[in-house]
Amino acid sequence: MRVSWKSWLLLLLFHICNAQDDGETPITLPKEVDACNGIFLQYNFDSRQKEYPRLKNATAQPWAFKSQLTVVNTGATELKTWQAFIGFQHDEILVSVDGATILNGDSFPMKVGKNGTHLTGYPQADLRTAIDTAGDLTQMAAKVKIKGTMFGVKLGGNVMPSNIKLENEGFKCPKATTKGRQSMHVCCTKDPKFKPKKKLLKFFPRRKADLSFTYDIIQSFKGNYIAQVTIDNHHPLGRLDHWNLTFEWMRNEFIYDMRGAFTRKKDPSECLYSAAGGYYQDMDFSKVMNCQKKPIISDLPSTMKDDDHVGKLPFCCRDGQILSKIMNATKAKSVFQMNVFKLPPDLNRTAINPPQNWNIKGVVNPHYKCSQPIRVDPTETPDPSGVEATISAIASYQVTCNITKPKPKMAKCCVSFSAYYADSVVPCNTCACGCEDEDTRKCDKDARALPLPAEALLVPFANRTIKAKAWAKIKHIDLPKKLPCPDNCPMSVNWHLDSDYKTGWSARITMFNWQRRPFEDWFLAVQLKKAFVGYENVYSFNGTKLGKVDRMIFMKGFPGLNYLIGLTNGSKPGEPPVPGKQQSVISFLKKNTPGIRVAGGDGFPTKVIFNGEECALPRRLPRRSVGSRQSPVGLLPAVIIVFSTFILINFFLPSMAPFL
Ligand SMILES: *[C@@H]1O[C@H](CO)[C@@H](O)[C@H](O)[C@H]1NC(C)=O
Ligand SMILES: *[C@@H]1O[C@H](CO)[C@@H](O)[C@H](O)[C@H]1NC(C)=O
Ligand SMILES: *[C@@H]1O[C@H](CO)[C@@H](O)[C@H](O)[C@H]1NC(C)=O
Ligand SMILES: *[C@@H]1O[C@H](CO)[C@@H](O)[C@H](O)[C@H]1NC(C)=O
Ligand SMILES: *[C@@H]1O[C@H](CO)[C@@H](O)[C@H](O)[C@H]1NC(C)=O
Ligand SMILES: *[C@@H]1O[C@H](CO)[C@@H](O)[C@H](O)[C@H]1NC(C)=O
Ligand SMILES: *[C@@H]1O[C@H](CO)[C@@H](O)[C@H](O)[C@H]1NC(C)=O
Ligand SMILES: *[C@@H]1O[C@H](CO)[C@@H](O)[C@H](O)[C@H]1NC(C)=O
Ligand SMILES: *[C@@H]1O[C@H](CO)[C@@H](O)[C@H](O)[C@H]1NC(C)=O
């Protein structure tokens, strides 16, 4: 009786590690584990090696490292969904993490930066007690193997993280103890003062985010399960059109069938030569939907909504459109189902591992960055038969995604500025939407965009060069030898400061669609920090103030005017193509914004969002021309008023009249 189970644990752990890691350093838990009645965490730094490139500058030198985190339940209660923090502090880049998923990251290789990283168990999320398992360490402990790169720690320097701790609610961890140069441990114990929230959650609470996926297991069999994926848009300026979703299967699963969505590739031969083909010898793979590790999934067109085999699912089949709740709450959600087949060793109804590394993309839409799936309390839905009962999913996981600002030169939309007092337009930035395909021998990716005459905005970039050159001659602007590259944006917006008088001011907004595909149900949001409170009206669009969202003015088309047509061919052969256009005037009063400097910058937006995509803004404001007209008659109207759609003329001219 003197030999405690903890000593066995040490011995056992030693053996397991020796057996599994053939040759790798075994975990030796310090004897402090004996004194731990709670959750014991240990971080062991195994080894590191200088990587290429070899640098003279020691602070920039990359090193490949291997380490291990072990989490052991040495207490008397089971720990559900363990979550730990490792305080990496050497600009680590994680290359693989085996045994856990990273909570605050996307796909590998993953930059940790200086803030450390948060992990949760995967596939082993729960740590049972010695009591319940007769000391079975495989169920009580989780081992995470980490491989990565660290920077700039000289030989003999400190390679350890700043701290490790358990992050589950209701536990307290002292600062971790470092033992020797390459090991660190901590014993986290239950916080006696911790009061669980009213509703006792078994798993993680659902988290708030701009967009979320719920992965509900609605039926589970030994070798396969049915998952229902729900996409919810929570951000007022979030949105997706023609979305493509990708994720990564980690346990050789494959998609047998789908309802409400489809995979972009269906290749039975790929299945036959995969692990699935090896195991399911008798399966007819011509019926299988997809065996890719990273499938691309898209929404079905609305014409398939009532199809008996693939449709008939609420919130499905919208051709990949997910709107924001302020546009239409019922369209802010999308649902599809898939039948997922599993492979050994997961042939067990309870062995479910949701795919990892989720990513969703639309056409001209926000850029989302998503977390890994986390087990949450099962989704409850009312019984469809009308009986007062709720149906719970077998298991539910949540993936949360937030909108990130597009990186420079990676936008999908750009803005040009013009004003009544300036002859030249400040066009969209060079390469605002990328220049991957541009030949740098022919154009300069970094040159400042050339000032343009207003009418040049109406033609595609390729046809502006002649106009820009002629304009430069008139305005005595020196042209560089190599002209700037195009902006390459499929969509652009012109903000024209139209008038500025004693009691108010106005601007004219023109949207241009440069791609053949139209934009349906478009929206445009502009941020005007100072002028926001003075917003009066937007003519011919339906405008609303969104005070809660960054002082934005939200605009969409009225019913029947919510369609921005695509690029069309010129009316005669040889004429340049004509972009789809829509235009309106927005007016402001100065009563509540004393001292506003409209031409000085306050009259230009600080953020422009089209269909959720943040547009690239010019870096300059229009410059006052010598002898410019002071009257508020702009340059653009003369050209743009000749409009392609009669609707616009009808709607737009009467409201324009006061300004002309
Ligand atoms: C060495 O590299 C670091 C990090 O990249 C950099 O900040 C520093 O300026 C470099 N030092 C020298 C002398 O080049
Ligand atoms: C680190 O944390 C600070 C403060 O919370 C935050 O401002 C910063 O953006 C974080 N850095 C990274 C790389 O996440
Ligand atoms: C998303 O943003 C919310 C706050 O709006 C934050 O609590 C959450 O951690 C973020 N999630 C990710 C994955 O960055
Ligand atoms: C929202 O979308 C639904 C489904 O297409 C439609 O029936 C409803 O009329 C729309 N509501 C509004 C306010 O546009
Ligand atoms: C299925 O897994 C559970 C726990 O993961 C285990 O208790 C059970 O014995 C397994 N069943 C089979 C048939 O392997
Ligand atoms: C979605 O994927 C298909 C096929 O790979 C591709 O043609 C399409 O452009 C993608 N759409 C988006 C919005 O990325
Ligand atoms: C417009 O540009 C295209 C592509 O450079 C060219 O083929 C076309 O002739 C130009 N049209 C006019 C009217 O300049
Ligand atoms: C304008 O939009 C608001 C909300 O965005 C909506 O409630 C209202 O009905 C719309 N007005 C018209 C005339 O469509
Ligand atoms: C538009 O022009 C392109 C080539 O310039 C041609 O292929 C296409 O058929 C034309 N489309 C229409 C609708 O005329």
Image (cartoon, rainbow, N blue to C red):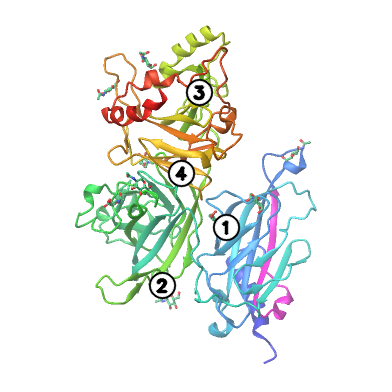
Mark 3 or 4: the one toward you: 3
Residue shown at the point (28%, 27%) measured from the top left: 645
User: Depth check: 254 or 659 in front?
Assistant: 659
Q: Amino acid at mark 2?
A: Thr
Marks 3 and 4, Cα distance to the nearest angstrom?
29 Å
Q: Amino acid at mark 4?
A: Pro
Q: Give the numbered dot on residue 350.
A: 2
**Label 1: which secondary element:** strand
Mark 4 or 2: the one toward you: 4
- For label 2, being within 8 Å of ligand 5 is answered yes
Check contact, mark 4 vs mark 1: CB within 8 A.
Answer: no
Mark 2 or 3: the one toward you: 3
**Mark 2 vs mark 3: which is more N-terminal?**
2
**Mark 4 vs mark 2: which is more N-terminal?**
2
Query: Relative to 139, is 524 on the left or the right?
Result: left
Q: Amino acid at mark 1?
A: Val
**Mark 4 vs mark 1: which is more N-terminal?**
1
Query: Relative to 503, is 145 on the left or the right?
Result: right
Residue ID for mark 1: 97
Q: Please say whether residue 44 is one of the residues in the magenta stretch.
A: yes
Marks 4 and 1, Cα distance to the nearest angstrom?
29 Å
* Residue 294 in view: no
Q: Please say whether residue 325 is one of the residues in the magenta stretch.
A: no
Residue ID for mark 3: 419
Mark 4 Cα shell of 10 Å, populated few (<14), some (14-19), many (≥20): many
Residue 478: x and y in percent read: 58, 10
Residue 474: x and y in percent read: 51, 7
Marks 4 and 2, Cα distance to the nearest angstrom?
36 Å
